[in-house]
Image (cartoon, rainbow, N blue to C red):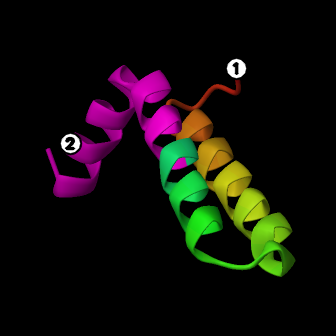
Amino acid sequence: MSLFGKLKSLVSKNEKNVEMAIDKAADLVQSKTGDDVDHKVEGAAEKAKNFVDGLDGQKD
């Protein structure tokens, strides 16, 4: 199995934890930056969570 395949499997099995980590990272970035970039950070976090959601080949 390739490295990407292993990562994909690991992330798919722990999807909720990965999404919580993405949210925590976004909160950290928002706390360190100005309010003018909050919408960009939130958008990037949503895209990352959608990517994680699609790794198993099914949208939840």
Mark 1 residue element: loop
Of residues 57 and 34, the one drawn nearer to the viewer in this rendering: 34
Spatial CA span between label 1 and label 2: 21 Å
Mark 1 residue type: Asp
Is residue 26 rendered magenta in the image? no
Q: Which mark is residue 60?
A: 1
Q: Amino acid at mark 2?
A: Lys
Residue at the disc numbered 2: 6
Residue at x 59%, y 56% (from the top left corner):
26
* Among the 4 quarters of the image, the one containing residue 1: top left
Please tell me whether mark 2 sits on a helix, a strand or a loop. helix
Residue 15 on the magenta span: yes
Q: In percent of the image, x 26 and y 45: which residue is there?
A: 7
Query: In screen coordinates, is 26 left or right of 34?
Result: left
Which image quadrant is residue 40 in? bottom right
- Main SS type for the magenta part? helix
Question: Camera-side residue: 12 or 43?
Answer: 43
Q: Which residues are magenta?
A: 1-22
